Image (tube, helix red, strand yellow):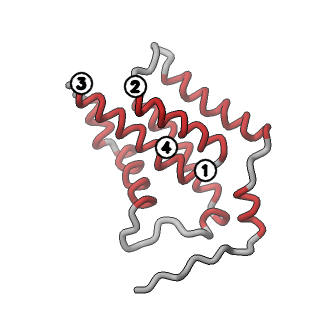
Amino acid sequence: MEKEKFRMPTDISLAAVLAAPAHRLWAERQIWFQRRMDDASAAGPIAIGEQAEALLVDLQLAFCAGAWVAVVILAQTVLDADMADREAAGAGGIGLNDIRFGHDYIWLRNRRNALVHEEGDTALALRDQTATRDRLERDARRAVELLFKALED
């Protein structure tokens, strides 16, 4: 099946999506993200590797900007980097099994995979960037919460 050629829509709402968020909205998102990070580190600093730490910075930037699809992708990527570090260090146990096989983490991995790898059904179309922003944001917030839950274990 031949794919349609990309045509930039003239929908004014796409222009709004592409605009930088207001400073106040950026700050609200930054506070929300920081609270999750603070909660995860309440028992002590979060021990993550350099790559996961660097990706976490981009995750926070994407979250504050409202790049919801990127947030889901990056959250799973940070989790993957952290898991690789833990496994290389010989870590194991129930916590890692929950991250590998827990219902919520399977949702996150499947959601990221659907967004990144188009296999049959299209998980994301340009119209979703405007028509389903609320759902994309909910998914992004859920992804961040799951990531920090995993990092505090």
User: Considering the numbered disc 4 on the image, is that residue within a helix, a strand or a loop?
Assistant: helix
Crowding near the residue tagged with mark 1, few <14, some 14–19, many ≥20 C-alpha atoms within 10 Å: some
**Label 1 is placed on what type of residue?**
Ala
Residue 77, position as x, y percentages in the image: 41, 43
Which residue is labeled 2 in the image? 48
Are dots 4 and 3 in contact, CB under 8 Å? no
Helix, strand, or loop for circle 1?
A: loop
Mark 2 and mark 3 lie on one chain; the one further toward the N terminus is 2
Can you identify the residue that label 4 sits on?
143
Which mark sits nearer the N-terminus, 1 or 4? 1
What element does badge 3 sit on?
loop
Q: Quick one: label 2, few (<14), some, or many (20+) residues within 10 Å?
A: some
Residue highlighted by disc 1: 67
Q: CA distance from mark 2 to mark 1?
A: 24 Å
Please state which amino acid type lies under the numbered disc 4.
Answer: Ala
Q: CA distance from mark 2 to mark 3?
A: 12 Å
Q: Are marks 1 and 4 in contact (CB under 8 Å)?
A: no
Neighbour class for label 3 at 10 Å: few (<14), some, many (≥20)?
few
Distance CA(mark 4)–CA(mark 2): 17 Å
Dot 2 or dot 1, earlier in sequence: 2
Could you tell me which residue is drawn at 69 percent across and 74 percent down? 9
Q: Which residue is tagged 3?
A: 89
Closer to the observer: label 4 or label 3? 3
Taking the image as shown, residue 136 lies to the left or right of residue 50, namely right
Specify the amino acid type for callout 3: Ala
| Spatial CA span between label 1 and label 3 | 33 Å
Label 2 secondary element: loop
Q: Earlier in the sequence, mark 1 or mark 3?
A: 1
Between circles 4 and 2, the one closer to the viewer is 2
Q: Nearer the viewer, mark 1 or mark 4?
A: 1
Examine the rendered structure and indicate whether residue 13 appears above or below residue 107.
below
Q: Earlier in the sequence, mark 4 or mark 2?
A: 2
